[in-house]
Image (cartoon, rainbow, N blue to C red):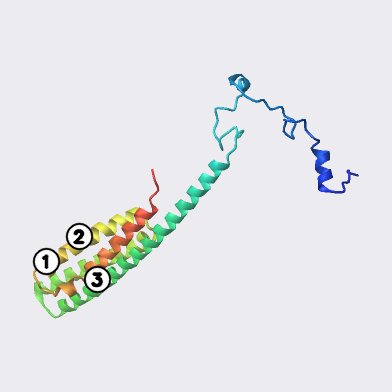
Amino acid sequence: MGRRFRSRKECNRWRFPQAPPGSPPERIPVKAAYDPDDIAGLDFLDGYPGIAPYLRGNLFKRRDLMIGRFINRRKASMGLAFGRLGAACYLAWGAFHVYVAYQIYQLALANQGLVQGRLAQLALYMLSFALFAIAVALWGNWRNSRWGYWLNLLVLGWADAIWVITVVAPGYVPAARGLIPVAIYIAGAVLTTAGMLASRRPA
């Protein structure tokens, strides 16, 4: 059977006998001063904490890695949240223009000849922009992807710029009505940009 002790203090006295004055409990001799000769021949002094051969403490390196991972995860989650808010704006933009394409198609049915063909063509163009925005928002912006960000930012911005130049600026529709899709686009662009910046890792 193992040795039995009546108290922890008695156990510690048995495990760590009283060391001579001026020496640690481990009975390792400690000098008052050290010089380069004391470390001559040691082969682990050129390493770094947390890197092989793991002979030095790696507490601080491990802590820094954990903090860095936490910060990166938090930034990624914030970027994803902003990206999904921006995707919702682009989905609203696409749904609005699906309705606009339907209105143009109804106007085409009320005409005949070349005018009807041109209006039907415009309705199809509008529908293609709307479906493009919805598809990229679902598969790109919802995941806060870089390609989705640039596609909707550039293509929808181009579409709204043409709309403002050819329809809103000449006064064919009231500005309060004509700038609604532009405002939705700007909100989506700002939110997706915030998502890209929030999820970006330092170089």
Which of pointers 2 and 3 lies earlier in the amino acid sequence?
Answer: 3
Rendered location of residue 74, percent (x, y): 45, 56
Query: Whole-Å distance between the Cαs marked 2 and 3?
Result: 14 Å
| Viewer-closest of 106 and 67 | 67
Q: Position of residue 188 (x, y in %)?
A: 30, 64
- Label 2: which residue? 158
**Image quadrant in which you'd find residue 154:** bottom left
Q: Residues within 10 Å of mark 3 (few under 14, many from 20)?
A: many
Q: Is label 1 in contact with label 3 (beta carbons under 8 Å)?
A: no
Q: Secondary structure at mark 1?
A: helix
Give above or below for 7 relative to 129.
above
Disc 2 crowd rating (10 Å Cα; few below 14, some 14-19, many 20+) is few
**Residue name at image x 22 percent, y 67 percent:** 182
Q: What residue is pinned by disc 1? A: 166
Question: Which residue position holds label 3?
Answer: 97
- Which three-letter amino acid code belongs to the residue tagged 3? His
* SS class, disc 3: helix
